Amino acid sequence: MAAPLARICGKFCRHLSRPWSTLQLGIRNRSSSSAVELSTGNEAMPGIVCPPLQTFSEEENMMREAVKKFAQEQILPCVSEMDENSKMDERVIRGLFEQGLMGVEIDPQYGGTGSSFFASILVIEELAKVDPSIAVLCDIQNTLINTLLSKLGTEEQKQNYLSRLSTDMGYKGITCFLLDRETDGLHIGKKENKLGLRASSTCPLHFDNVKVPEKNILGHVGHGYKYAIGMLNEGRIGIAAQMLGLAQGCFDHAVAYTRQRVQFRKRIFDFQSMQHQIAHVATQLEAARLLTYNAARLKEAGRPFIKEACMAKYFTAEVATLTTSKSIEWMGGVGFTKDYPVEKFYRDCKIGTIYEGTSNIQLTTMAKFIDQEYDQ
């Protein structure tokens, strides 16, 4: 049975033009009142109308709504228990596969949804609004593992593994070579007891005299570092989407509380100092969203995006830290308890400044690109 998102994509991808595809192809967009021609250049020509970054195709809107509904109905009821037990609910994992969320960009011939990189970013953002632990599982698989295998894998490897990555819960062990979990000598170590993202397992892998068949080599021998670094550039946009969704989810809970909580005969939202803080954080969130969407659009358009990906990851991690901290302060004592989800968002966001390149690494990379730009 086809996954729900695959059905959505199959129905619309052939008939709908994504809002940015007209920019890539220079297609004339006609309406009843005007006709404007869009081009591929970086600078706008007279009369050109470029769609806002938050303009979504019908397919993308339907996907966002489908993921939002899935997250609210199937993930949200399990969040506290998964965090407490440091274990992901099997029903949630099964739901991710059944909904087609673990193979968003994988070609339908391999059992995937056949959608776009930007769609992956939207999926990650929506999942992170409810539980970043689930979002990081979806993020790593879609922006790193699936991409690496799709770009470098042989046809035999794609047939063997891509179909399992998009539909099978039993895969494990993939770097620049491919291994089945049952491979002799491969052992999964003790699960780390982490501060945040507790439902998402982090375990060391032990290789004891493991023999890797030549057919399982992914790409070229000796090019693993280059592949890993290349995938991180795309993965950083995924992390940015995760931090963005996390921050937005926390912000939504906190603002709702300030609009309900009454002190001194008025909502705490109505105090001017509170309004200024909320408006400031909302502005930071919007800027983070635009950075993330812009990096994703650039990647999809085949244009340079490494600097923009670093900017998005760096800034969204900083905004997530600010948002979650402020949210606890706005809610006071109850924000410090596990009765509300903001303390979990606070713990989950810390990893954003660390994995897939620390914030200092992002700043260093950005500075190198800025230096090169001024050489031209």
Image (tube, rainbow, N blue to C red):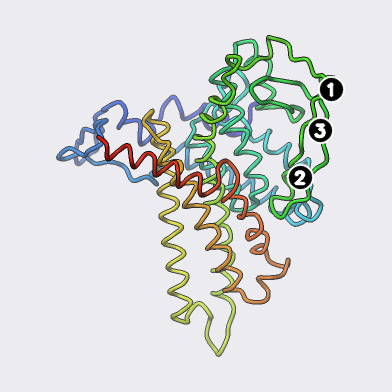
Give the residue drawn at x 75%, y 42%.
201
Amino acid type, callout 1: Gly
Closer to the chain start, of discs 2 and 3, is 2
Real-space Cα separation, disc 1 to disc 3, in angstroms: 10 Å
Q: Nearer the viewer, mark 2 or mark 1?
A: 1
Q: Which residue is mark 1?
A: 185
Is the Cβ of the residue at disc 2 closer than 8 Å to that at disc 3?
no
In the rendered image, residue 363, in percent from the top left (x then y), is placed at 45, 47
| In-front residue for pair 313/163 | 313
In the current view of this chain or complex, which residue is farthest to the left? 46
Amino acid type, callout 2: Met
Real-space Cα separation, disc 2 to disc 3, in angstroms: 17 Å
Give the residue drawn at x 52%, y 85%.
266
Q: Which residue is mark 3?
A: 188
| In-front residue for pair 333/309 | 309
Q: Report the quarter where the C terminus lies.
A: top left
On screen, residue 115 above or below 273: above
Look at the numbered disc 3 and give the secondary structure of its residue.
strand
Amino acid type, callout 3: Ile
Q: Residue 5 lies in what quarter of the image?
A: top right
> Residue 176 bears which disc, if any?
none
Q: Nearer the viewer, mark 2 or mark 3?
A: 3
In the rendered image, residue 274, in percent from the top left (x then y), is placed at 48, 77
Q: Which residue is mark 2?
A: 88
Look at the numbered disc 1 and give the secondary structure of its residue.
loop
Q: Judge the density around disc 3: few (<14), some (14-19), many (≥20) Cα neighbours within 10 Å.
A: some
Give the residue drawn at x 80%, y 19%.
210
In the rendered image, residue 306, in percent from the top left (x then y), is placed at 43, 36
| In-front residue for pair 364/72 | 364
In the rendered image, residue 339, in percent from the top left (x then y), is placed at 72, 68
On screen, residue 273 above or below 12: below
On screen, residue 104 above or below 215: below
